Amino acid sequence: MSTPRQDIVVMKFGGTSVEDSAAMLRTAAIVGGRVRKGLKPIVIVSAMSKVTDTLLAAAAAAGRNAREEALNLSDGLRTRHLNTAAELATGDRLTSLHLNIHHDFDSLDDLLRGISAVGELTPRTSDHVVSFGERLSSQMVAAAFAEQGLHGAHVDARNVILTDNHYGKAAPNERAIENAATSQLLPLVGTGKVPVMGGFIGSCDGITTTLGRGGSDYTGALVGGALHAGAIEIWTDVNGIMTTDPRIVPEALRVKTISFEEAAELAYFGAKVLHPATILPAVQKNIPVWVLNSRNAENEGTKITAAPPPCASPFKSIAAKKKLTIIDIVASRMLLAHGFLKMVFDVFDKYHCAIDMVSTSEISVSVTVDSREALPAISAELSKIADVKMEGNKALICLVGEDIRGQSGISGQVFSAISHVNVRMISQGASEINMSFMVNEEDVEEAIRSLHRKFFSTPDASIFDVEARTVASNA
C-alpha cells in the first residue's frame, strides 16, 4: 500500500479505558462516534487495568515453585473477567464469551503448573503468560461492541504483529506487518466491521512475543503506519500532553499541538502519556497522532505532528525521571588514551544498560543510568580500569521545546529560576529541543514548580489551553 487512507483511524485504548464494564461501554460510545462521522476505526486495546502486573506476579510465583499462589492469582483474574463479561453481553454472545474466557484461563493454569514443575521462568514463557491480558480484553471489547451494534470483530494480534524472537522486547517486522494488516484488517473494515485486537503482543514463527511494557501504543502506531491511516488516536485517562505533571503543578496546561520529536523526547524522559517508540512508525509515514482522554471524550487532546505551528514560549513541557544513579569514572592517566571511552561504554553495553546523560572533564567521565540491578556488576568491571563512585537517589529534569539552542540567554533564565536548587549535571548541546540537568530526588517537585512559574506564566494561547486555566480560575 502507498495511498493514504484518510478514512481509517487507529484507536488505541489503555488499561484504564477498558478497566471494567463501564469503561468498555465508554470506549464503545467513543468508537461509535467515529463510525457516525464516516470513519473506519481499527481498535487496539491494552489488558484491563492491573491485569498485566497480576499475570507477571503469577508467572514469578510459578517460577519459584509457589504453584498455589500462582493459581490463586489466576483464579482471581478469571472471576474478574467472567463478572465483567456478564455486565457486557447477553444470551448466546455471553455464553460464547464465557466459554472463551474459561478456555483461556484453563490454558493459563496449565502453563503456570508447567512453569512450577520445571521451576524456571524463561523470557519466552513469561511472554506467553502475560499475553493473556490483551487476548482476553480484546475478546471482551469486541463482544461489547457487537452488543452495542458496532459489528466488532475480534482479531488475534499475533497474526498481525509479526516480530523477531527477542522475548520481552521483540522488534517488529514492519514489512510483514504491513502485509498481514492489509490482508486481515482491510477486508473487515471494507465490510463495515470494527476490528478489535490486543496491543503489546505479537508472534515470531507462531510463538507469542511481546513488544515491551507500554507496547500497546506501539501496536497502534505499527498498524496505523502499515495501513497509512489518516490518524492514530491514543486514548488514555488524561486530557493530552501537559506542560508538566498536574500532580506537581495543579495549574499545568494542556499542550494543544507538539512535534513528533518533542513528544518522543518527553516520553523518554518520564512523561508517561506515550511509550517512547510509539510514534516512530507514525513519523515515518507522517501520520498525525492524537492523545485523548476516554473519560473526557469531548476534550480536544494533544495533536502530535511533524511540523506544529511556531510557539512564542521557549518550552512546551517539563518532564522528570527519578530513581537515577550518577556514576563517576575517574582515570586521570587513561582518560585521554585511545580506546578508553570505548572500554567504558562497552561495559554498559555488555549489561544492556542505557545511559541517559554523559558529562566529561579532563580526568573523569560521569554518566547517569536508571538500571539498578546491574550496577554492582558494572561497578566491578569499571573498577578494573578506573576509580568508580556512585551517587543514587538522583533525578533528571528535562525541558523540551523547539530550537532551544537558538534562544539567547535561555540557560541563564532556567538556572536563575532554580538558583535555590543544587544542580549536579547539565546537558544541552546534544539536542536542539532538550535541556536536561540532574538534581537530588527530594528537590524535583520544587524545581519543576519554579520552572513552571517562570516559563508558563504567560503561555502562547495558540499552543496551550489557556482557556481551561481561565475557566478554572473563575470557578
Image (cartoon, rainbow, N blue to C red):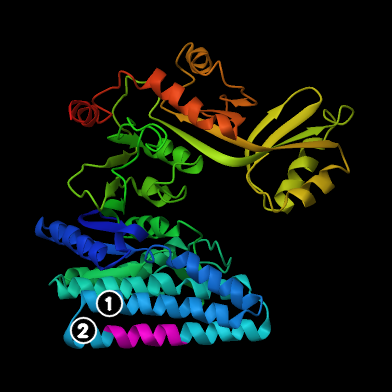
Question: Residue 274: where, in percent of width, then height?
Answer: 41, 48
Residue located 17% across and 73% down the image: 151
Label placed on residue 324 = none
- Give above or below for 187 relative to 420: below
Q: Nearer the viewer, residue 447 or 398?
A: 447
In this picture, residue 28 sits left or right of residue 432: left
Considering the numbered disc 2 on the image, is that residue within a helix, a strand or a loop?
helix
Amino acid type, callout 2: Arg
Q: Report the Cα–Cα distance between label 2 and label 1.
A: 10 Å
Where in the figure is residue 449, as x and y percent of width and height?
44, 26
The residue that label 2 is drawn on is: 93
Q: Position of residue 36 (x, y in %)?
A: 9, 59
Q: Is there any visible trace of residue 158 in the rendered image? A: yes
Q: Earlier in the sequence, mark 2 or mark 1?
A: 1
Q: Is 114 in the magenta?
A: no
- Determine which quarter of the picture holds residue 185: bottom left
How far from the left and from the top, in percent, is residue 153? 24, 75
Position of 36 relative to 326 (above/below): below
Q: Which residues are magenta?
A: 97-106
Q: In front of the other: label 2 or label 1?
A: 1
The residue to which callout 1 is attached is 85
Q: Is residue 299 above or below residue 12?
A: above
**Callout 1 amino acid:** Ala
